[in-house]
Amino acid sequence: MNEIVPSPIVRGIFGIAGHAGIAHAYSHSGFVQEDSGGFALLLALLDKACPFEVTISSARLLSRERVRVTTSGGGIGEASARRGFSPFEESLMQRAVGMRSYAPQTVATYAFGRIYGQGVMESAAAFCLAIAKALLDTVRKTWPHGVLYEEENLSGTCGEFLGGSFLIGGAKVCWLLSINASRDGIGPNEDAEGCIPAGNKGRIMRALGMDSAPIIMLEGKAFIPPLADRISETVLLVRWNKEFDNPVVGECCVEAARHSGYPCLVQDDTYPRMDGALKKSTREAGEAIVRLGTSYAAAQGAAEKIELAASLAKLVSEDMGGSIFMTNAIHQYAGNGGMWPGHGAMLSLAVSRRYIEHWLIPVIDGTDMTRGLDVLLEAARLLIPRCAEATDFVQQRRPSLSEEDINRLTAVTY
C-alpha cells in the first residue's frame, strides 16, 4: 500500500514547502549554493505519490530573447533573458536534453558550467527559470486531483506557485512548490521565499491552511564557510531559531535525521530576526560600490582600471547576492531562509570545503535525493502526532499582520 497518496485539496494539519530561488547561487563571504534543492526534494516526494516524467525533452529559442523548455511529461516552461541568447548558448542548452533531474539549477549548471544572479549570467538564469517552470507545469498537468496555481505578483517578479494536498500515513498534508524569480534573468527576488505568505503565494497558503499550520521547510545544498571546516562530507543540516521559529518541527527533523544514520548538523540559533542585518549588508555593499566608483573615476592606467572593474564584477556577482535577494522590511520578519515566524524549521544540505574546492558550485545528485526523502518522510511521520503542539507555536509566534500589511511590505502588483 502506498503510504503517500494524492488527495483532493483539503486544509492540511501541516505543510511541506520547497522553493527554487532562481540564480541565488552566490553570496557574501564565500557562500555558494544550489538554491533549487528544496524544490527538487518536494518534487521527488510528489513523484512518489504520483509518478510523472521530468526528463528534459527539448530546449529551444522562440526568439533571440526567449527560451522554451519541455519535459517528456508534457511540461512547458518559458523565460526571457535581458541581453538575449547567442546561438552558442542555445547549443549549450542541448546538454540538458535527456537529463532527468528534479533540480533546475543543477541542470542549468550542467549546461552552462555555473550560474550567477544579479544580472551577471542572464542566459543561464533564464534557462534555469524555464526548466523550473517546465517541471512545475509537469506536476500541474499530471497531478490527479485539483491543484492551486498562481503566478508571482510581487514587483518585478515572474515566478510561479503550485499547491495541493496528499495523504501521508492517512494524515492530511498540504504541499507548496515555489519558483522565485525576477524578469529577464536578473534575479533573484525572494520576497515570497520559504513560507512568507506574500501576494499570490499567500492566497494559496490561506486556501490550503498553510497560513496557520506547521511547515517543514525544504532548502538547497550550500557551502557555508563557518560550517565547512567542521565536516568532511555532505551532511544534512537542520536549522531554526528557538526564539522565533517552530521547535517542534525542528525536533521532528532532527530526530528523523538521527534515526536515518546519515551525517547531520543541527542549529537552533540561526535566522535572527528584527536586527537590521539585511539593511546593514545592503548599506555595506552600496558603500563598497561607491569606493570602487570613486577609485575608478580617478584611475589613469589600464591595469588599475582593469583591477577595479574586476573587483566590482566580483562584488556584484558574489557579495551582493547576500543582500539583493529580499526586501529589508520582509527580512526583519523572515530572515535569510524565508521563515515566517512560528511556522517551521529548515531541512537542507551542507557541503565540505573539499567539495567546493573541487566543484566550485554545489549540485544535487541521487544520494542527496535519497537521503533527503528518507529524512523528510520520517520527519512527517514524527510530526503527525505532535501537530497540535506544533500548531500552538504557530499561533503564539506568527506576526499579527494582515494580508494587506504583508503585501505592502513586498510591493505586490495586481
Image (cartoon, helix red, strand yellow):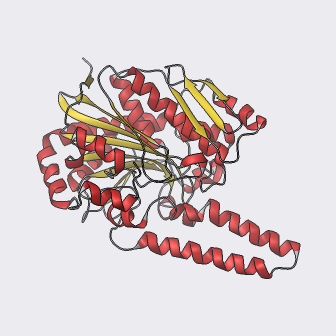
Residue 187 in the image, given as x and y percentages of width and height: 55, 52
Front residue of 61/37: it is 61
- Is residue 196 among what the camera can see? yes
Question: Residue sitting at 41 percent across and 60 percent down?
Answer: 336
Q: In this view, does 89 lie to the left or right of 4?
A: right
Q: Residue furthest front?
A: 414
Q: Which residue lies furthest to the right in this view?
A: 301
Question: Residue sitting at 55 percent across and 40 percent down?
Answer: 129
Q: Is residue 392 above or below residue 40?
A: below
Residue 75 in the image, given as x and y percentages of width and height: 50, 25
Front residue of 255/392: it is 392
User: To which quarter of the image does residue 398 belong?
Assistant: bottom left
Question: Residue sitting at 39 percent across and 74 percent down?
Answer: 276
- Is residue 240 among what the camera can see? no
Looking at the rendered image, the quarter that the N terminus falls into is top left
Q: Is residue 318 left or right of residue 282?
A: right
Q: Is residue 254 left or right of residue 317?
A: left
Front residue of 393/409: it is 409
Front residue of 290/346: it is 290
Q: Is residue 165 above or below residue 119?
A: above
Residue 379 in the image, given as x and y percentages of width and height: 27, 41
Residue 383 in the image, given as x and y percentages of width and height: 20, 42
- Give the total number of marks visible in the rendering: 0
Question: Residue sitting at 65 percent across and 49 percent down?
Answer: 358
